[in-house]
Amino acid sequence: MTRDTAKQDALLDELLKGYTNPKDLLGEHGLLKQLTKRLVERALEAEMTAHLG
């Protein structure tokens, strides 16, 4: 296991701590949807910064 993989596993463990219901992870307001939203927003912000300078 590489150092990056171990770090990623630790981050996932921390994110998933306390979640027991699949709906909390995959539901309409679940963790996966929140993470996807934030990832897309950051990517769009970076694209705008690169485009506009």
Image (cartoon, helix red, strand yellow):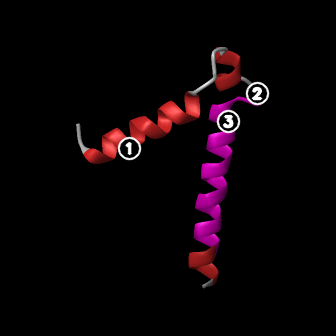
The earlier-in-sequence mark between 1 and 3 is 1
Please rate how many residues cluster around mark 1, counting C-alpha atoms within 10 Å: few if below 14, some from 14 to 19, many from 20.
Answer: few
Residue at the spot 65% in from the left edge and 66% down from the top edge: 45
Q: For this rendering, which residue is in front, 15 or 24? A: 15
Q: Which residue is mark 1?
A: 7
Q: In whole angstroms, how far apart are the C-alphas of marks 1 and 3?
A: 22 Å
Give the x, y percent position of residue 17. 58, 27
Instruction: State which quadrant residue 26 falls in.
Output: top right
Mark 3 sits on what residue?
33
Give the percent coordinates (x, y) of residue 18: 63, 23
Tell me the number on the disc at residue 17: none
Establish if 10 lies above or below 23. below
Q: Are marks 1 and 2 in contact (CB under 8 Å)?
A: no
The residue that mark 2 highlights is 28
Give whichever of 22, 36 is nearer the camera: 22
For the residues labelled 2 and 3, say whether their Cβ atoms are less than 8 Å apart: yes
